[in-house]
Amino acid sequence: MLRCVTEDNQSLIATYCEETSTRTLSRTDKLFCPNCRGTVTFNKGKVKLPYFSHKSVECEYVGSEPETADHLKGKALLYDWLQQKFPKASVEYEVYQPQTGQIADVYVDHENGEFAGQTWAFEFQHSNISAADWESRHNLYESVGIQDFWFFDKKKFMKYSKARDHTDARLRSELEKKVFNTTGFVYFLDLDSSEVSIDFGFTNRPSSNLFNGRWRTQEYIYHEPQEHSVFLSFLKARKSVNFDYSALVCDTLEAQMEIRLKYVAFVAYRET
Ligand SMILES: [Zn+2]
């Protein structure tokens, strides 16, 4: 985890706290899990970002994702971006939701401003998750009025065809299709470049190949347009005028995303 609290309930963020004083607090058992109040250790090494971990008790409130270097990095990128983008909102790591038992990687509460009343959960997904597990977690958030945004580790989740001359064609998993059809979009985060690829439209193209002396036609799936990535810092939220829903868009792709945004408004999140 990337957040802990001190004896007087001040939050400490692992990537920003002062090292020497935090190490002292850690040694003297004065850092605590915000959720179960168990003592935690400050870890800072060479490979992973700094983070906190429970000393002994098995915390029943920790997130479901193992704290790998990649998961820490993805969470930290999202947190830093959200802090900068929404300075008026409360942006916090790993807030426990008592109604659902979930802990979002980053939780955003808009008490005022353009998005007043909206609460967002951001999840960076690096480990495997089935379409069914994703759906039940999404439904839990929805049941308590929290809008969830999922960022999938691009290197792990975005797959391409291995067929010759078609290596830019996409191979879409059941999980991707489920997220796309339910929320309207799929976001992939590249941990090395901090670029986000937004899936919002696909096209099928047939291609004929000579295979064992016979012509065979196969369909390949392409994202349309081919270029659909943007630096995370350029991503912005766009609020629906009719109901409490926001989509993440960017200036360079927004016009091309309109059709999909309409689908989201009328199909996935239609007013009831
Ligand atoms: Zn705990």
Image (tube, rainbow, N blue to C red):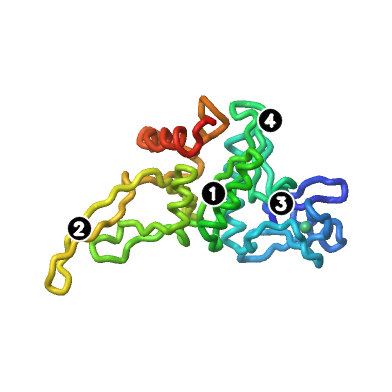
Task: Locate ligand 1 by image quadrant.
Answer: bottom right
Query: What type is the residue that disc 3 sits on?
Result: Gly
- Mark 3 lies on residue: 101
Q: Earlier in the sequence, mark 4 or mark 2?
A: 4
Q: Earlier in the sequence, mark 4 or mark 1?
A: 4
- Mark 4 lies on residue: 111
Residue at the image position 19 percent from the left and 61 percent from the top: 217
Residue at the image position 52 percent from the left and 60 percent from the top: 130
User: Can residue 251 be seen from the camera position used here?
Assistant: no
Q: CA distance from mark 4 to mark 2?
A: 52 Å
Q: Position of residue 136 (x, y in %)?
A: 59, 52
Of 55 and 201, nearer the camera is 201
Q: Earlier in the sequence, mark 1 or mark 3?
A: 3
Q: Position of residue 128 (x, y in %)?
A: 54, 63
Of 2 and 153, nearer the camera is 153
Residue at the image position 46 percent from the left and 59 percent from the top: 157
Count of numbered labels shown in the rendering: 4
Q: Position of residue 178 (x, y in %)?
A: 47, 51
- Mark 2 lies on residue: 207
Q: Earlier in the sequence, mark 4 or mark 3?
A: 3
Secondary structure type for disc 1: strand
Which quadrant of the rendered structure holds the C terminus? top right
Q: CA distance from mark 4 to mark 3?
A: 22 Å
Q: Quadrant of residue 243?
A: top right
Q: CA distance from mark 2 to mark 1?
A: 33 Å
- Residue 264 versus residue 216 in the image, above or below: above
- Residue 83 versus residue 212 in the image, above or below: above
Answer left or right for 225 relative to 210: right
User: Can residue 193 be seen from the camera position used here?
Assistant: yes
Residue at the image position 44 percent from the left and 46 percent from the top: 181
- Mark 1 lies on residue: 150
Query: What type is the residue that disc 4 sits on?
Result: Glu
